């Protein structure tokens, strides 16, 4: 079974600055094939390689250090790390085989019920993790799937030198919630 991770997105928010064109060109040249978006007060780095932050850390660490240094950013106001997962389903009604979360409902409704979008928030010491679970149709595999989005969020000032450690903390929070939400039977099937 393939890992369900499709996309990873990292966002840094900071006080708006004016980007000198030559510095911006230098940064984009250094970023190379990395998918980055630079906007006033925000940097977004995106990966669709199907690997989580620990395997992205060598590349993203250099990219972040360069960005913070080139644009002389000393403090981040908000940091988020989002993982989008997609789990193929045998049938839409089988979604509960994959989740540790259950939905209590009257029996007549349960017989007709397939799935709906759910959103909830986990509170952590670093901030919170927003969770979205929803069904979807995957055209590539021509089957239903369960989309699970985990966004760990730290709101508050972070010194630039502490960003890498905070991203690791957000990753560990996402990993913890992933293991809490998905069934152990499903997790055991995943490549480790």
Image (cartoon, rainbow, N blue to C red):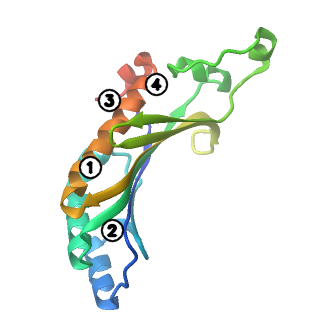
Q: Residues within 10 Å of mark 1 (few under 14, many from 20)?
A: some
Residue nearest the viewer, comparing 59 with 180: 180
Residue 128 spot, x, y in % from top left: 42, 41
Quadrant where the image shows the N terminus: top left
The percent position of residue 94, horizontal first and vertical second, equals 62, 20
The residue pinned by badge 4 equals 182
Q: Position of residue 58 (x, y in %)?
A: 19, 55
Q: Residue at x 33, y 68 (%)?
A: 33
Vertical position of residue 113 compared to residue 5: above or below:
above
Disc 4 versus disc 3: nearer the observer: 4
Q: Mark 3 and mark 1 in contact? Answer it, CB < 8 Å.
A: no
Q: Which residue is mark 1?
A: 166
| Of callouts 4 and 2, the N-terminal one | 2
Q: Position of residue 122 (x, y in %)?
A: 46, 34
Cα–Cα gap, marks 4 and 2:
33 Å
Q: In terms of secondary structure, where does tag 4 sit? A: loop
Q: Nearer the viewer, mark 1 or mark 4?
A: 1
Quickly name the residue at label 2.
33
Answer with mark 1 or mark 4, whichever residue precedes in sequence: 1
Q: Is residue 95 above or below residue 14?
A: above
Instruction: Classify residue 38 as left or right of residue 87.
Output: left
Q: Could you tell me which secondary element the residue under label 2 belongs to?
A: loop
State which mark lies toward you, 4 or 2. Answer: 4
3D distance between C-alphas at marks 2 and 3: 27 Å
The answer to whether the residue labelled 2 contacts the one labelled 3, judged by CB atoms less than 8 Å apart, is no
């Amino acid at each position: 079974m393939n890992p369900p991770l499709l996309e990873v997105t990292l966002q840094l928010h900071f006080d708006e600055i004016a980007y000198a064109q030559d510095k911006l060109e230098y940064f984009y040249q250094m970023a190379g094939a990395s998918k980055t978006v630079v906007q006033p007060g925000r940097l977004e780095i995106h990966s669709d390689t199907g690997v989580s932050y620990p395997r992205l850390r060598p590349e993203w660490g250099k990219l972040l250090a360069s960005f913070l240094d080139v644009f002389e950013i000393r403090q981040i106001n908000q940091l988020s790390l989002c993982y989008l997962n997609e789990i193929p389903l045998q049938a839409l009604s089988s979604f509960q085989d994959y989740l540790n979360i259950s939905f209590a409902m009257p029996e007549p409704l349960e017989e007709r019920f397939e799935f709906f979008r759910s959103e909830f928030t986990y509170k952590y010491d670093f901030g919170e993790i927003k969770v979205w679970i929803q069904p979807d149709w995957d055209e590539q595999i021509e089957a239903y799937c369960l989309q699970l989005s985990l966004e760990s969020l730290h709101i508050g000032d972070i010194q630039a030198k502490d960003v890498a450690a905070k991203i690791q903390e957000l990753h560990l929070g996402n990993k913890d919630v992933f293991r809490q939400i998905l069934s152990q039977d499903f997790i055991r099937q995943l490549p480790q």
